[in-house]
Image (tube, grey):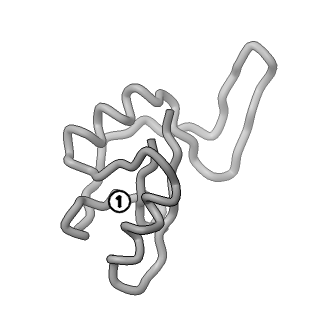
Amino acid sequence: MWFLATTTKTPKFFLANGSTVEADIDWTHEKVTSTGRLWSGAPMVESPAQAIAALNAKGAVSFKTKPEAKEFAKTLPAGGWKYYRIK
């Protein structure tokens, strides 16, 4: 699923009406997988299932594809946003 969020330090995710909302998402800078350790300067979603549940609970709009998310972004006022793929 794809979501759009502001580029602020704590991302605010867009609702269908163009307003934004904060979701209680667990962020991390480091993930340990069976193939090794991944570290990022930008925060990553720690638990995709938890993030999707939190975003759905807040009413954040989601998209199946990035092109669908881009079409929605065209309806927003000028500004910056970021695409998040959470699966």
Q: Is residue 18 above or below residue 25?
A: below
Residue type highlighted by circle 1? Lys
Furthest residue toward top = 34
Q: Is residue 23 above or below residue 79?
A: above
Compare residues 4 and 34 and report the one nearer the observer: 4
Give the quadrant of residue 69: bottom left
Quarter of the image for the N terminus: give it: top left
Which residue shows up at 69% across the image and 22% down it?
32
Furthest residue toward bottom = 78
Compare residues 32 and 2 and report the one nearer the observer: 2
On the image, numbered disc 1 is attached to which residue? Answer: 12
Dot 1: few (<14), some (14–19), or many (≥20) neighbours within 10 Å?
A: some
Which residue shows up at 19% across the image and 67% down it?
17
Q: Is residue 21 left or right of residue 65?
A: left
Q: Position of residue 12 (x, y in %)?
A: 35, 59
Q: Is residue 64 left or right of residue 85?
A: left
Compare residues 18 and 70 and report the one nearer the observer: 70
Q: Position of residue 19 (x, y in %)?
A: 22, 68
Give the quadrant of residue 58: top left
Q: Position of residue 35 (x, y in %)?
A: 80, 18
Q: Is residue 26 left or right of residue 32?
A: left
* Mark 1, secondary structure of its residue: loop
Q: Is residue 81 left or right of residue 21?
A: right
Which residue shows up at 27% across the image and 51% down it?
60
Q: Position of residue 38 (x, y in %)?
A: 74, 33
Q: Is residue 32 above or below residue 54?
A: above
